[in-house]
Image: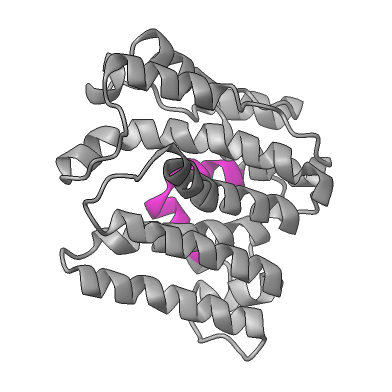
Amino acid sequence: MSLPDSIVPCARLVEQGAPDRFRTVMAAPVAARAALFPLYAFNVEVSRAPWLTQEAMIAEMRLQWWRDALEEIAEGTGVRKHEVTTPLGDLLSPAQARRLDESVAARRWDIYRDPFEDQAHMDAYIDQTAGHLMWTACEVLGAPPAAEQDVRRLAMAAGYAAFLRAVPALVEATRIPLLDGTRDGLRALAQRASDQVVRPALPSRAKPALWTAIGALKTLNQVIRDPDAVGDGALAPGITPFRLTRTALTGRLAL
């Protein structure tokens, strides 16, 4: 994979835990891979931490371990040795580490069975998970600060598309993922998310950080047309080989 030895374990974690993300990174220029793999490996580890145990306290401790590691990075005191935290410590600025700490804190919702309080709470969860990750990935690849709002808008749309694809699994796990699970409610949520879709203007070197949004609009439009596809688990996959190849070759997101 032409990666530094320290990055290879991160790549393996992403390959196993987030194969779609793995494909987007492998389609990116080699220079981008060493930055994206640690970030996406971090996301794999944090996103699955609440689901590895039925004990809420143990899940909280798992998330706290990552929060403590990010605090070490933010404070520059020397991060604990780990296959993900070590390269992450070399990559992140203090501000980026504190931002990702918010994304870990947001994952506490995954531990419990309480529904979102309201739409603002749900939006915050998507922004702090999908938005923080995508913007940090763009930033480490050289995106200018002026692009943040558009990147977060795209991440909101992509985050909701991924969340809607996950609804059947969340319901099976006895979670309450939706504020309004009716056909009209699902259609309205997908329409609201699709209204956020933009193609941020980024330098070429930063564009691979957007590629996890490939197919998001297609998914959201499918929900608008057929809300029952959400509960049926019939939503089409977002990232397909054709869409990824077209995006990589043309530089234009195949949304």
Quarter containing the C terminus: top right
Between residue 182 and residue 107, name the one nearer to us: 182
Is residue 196 placed above or below 79 in the rendered structure? above
> What's the residue at 60%, 71% (across, down)?
88
> What's the residue at 50%, 30% (across, down)?
239
Q: Hey, which quadrant is residue 169 in on the image?
A: top left
Is residue 158 placed above or below 7 in the rendered structure? above
Position of residue 6 measured from the top left corner of the image (x, y, whole percent): 58, 74
Give the mark count: 0
**Residue 215 visible within the image:** no
Q: Is the magenta stretch mostly helix, strand or loop?
A: helix
Left or right of 139? Residue 218 is: left
Is residue 11 placed above or below 155 in the rendered structure? below
> What's the residue at 50%, 47% (across, down)?
124
Q: Hey, which quadrant is residue 236 in on the image?
A: top left
Quarter containing the N terminus: bottom right
Residue at the outermost bottom position = 77
Position of residue 15 measured from the top left corner of the image (x, y, whole percent): 44, 52
Q: Answer whether residue 248 is magenta in the image.
A: no
Between residue 33 and residue 138, name the one nearer to us: 138
Position of residue 147 measured from the top left corner of the image (x, y, whole percent): 78, 43
> What's the residue at 31%, 34% (across, down)?
178
Position of residue 57 measured from the top left corner of the image (x, y, whole percent): 23, 74
Q: Answer whether residue 21 is magenta in the image.
A: yes
Between residue 19 and residue 116, name the one nearer to us: 116
**Residue 168 visible within the image:** yes
Q: Give the range drawn in magenta.
A: 10-26
